[in-house]
Amino acid sequence: MKNIGNLMRQAQEMQTRMAELQQELAAAEITGSSGAGMVAVTLNGKGEVRSIKIDPSIVDPNDVEVLEDLLMAAMNDARAKVDAHAAEEMSKLTGGIELPPGFKLPF
């Protein structure tokens, strides 16, 4: 029975640390960019857009597709960085234990 009590305590500690990690990730701001930094998108750790910066020199009403492509690339870059940051922090929390495919934490 002592092992079960110890296991329950460890599970509660992990749950507490997971809640703290979720708060830390939500507060993190990570920026992705494209076009040599002419378009920058900042997301929080949950993937919510916090800001978008566009260099005025690339705004051409006759060529909106370029701006759309740069914005999409910056968003994808930022999202990839958020995912990498979350995975790195989760790895620290789980001690490097690999999670099963499709099992995504903390969100």
Image: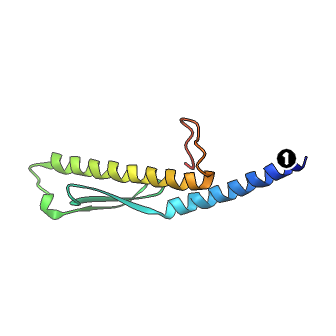
Image check: 45 left or right of 63? Answer: right
Q: Amino acid at mark 1?
A: Ile
Image check: 16 left or right of 56? Answer: right
Residue sitting at 43 percent across and 54 percent down?
Answer: 82
Residue sitting at 56 percent across and 52 percent down?
Answer: 90
Residue 77 seen in this snapshot: yes
Image check: 14 left or right of 87? Answer: right
Tell me the quarter of the picture where residue 58 sits.
bottom left
Q: Position of residue 81 (x, y in %)?
A: 40, 53
SS state under label 1: helix
Residue positioned most to the right: 1
Residue positioned most to the top: 101
Tell me the quarter of the picture where residue 43 sits.
bottom left
Q: Identify residue for label 1.
A: 4
Residue sitting at 28 percent across and 59 percent down?
Answer: 40
Q: Position of residue 86 (x, y in %)?
A: 50, 53
Crowd around label 1: few <14 · some 14–19 · many ≥20 (10 Å): few
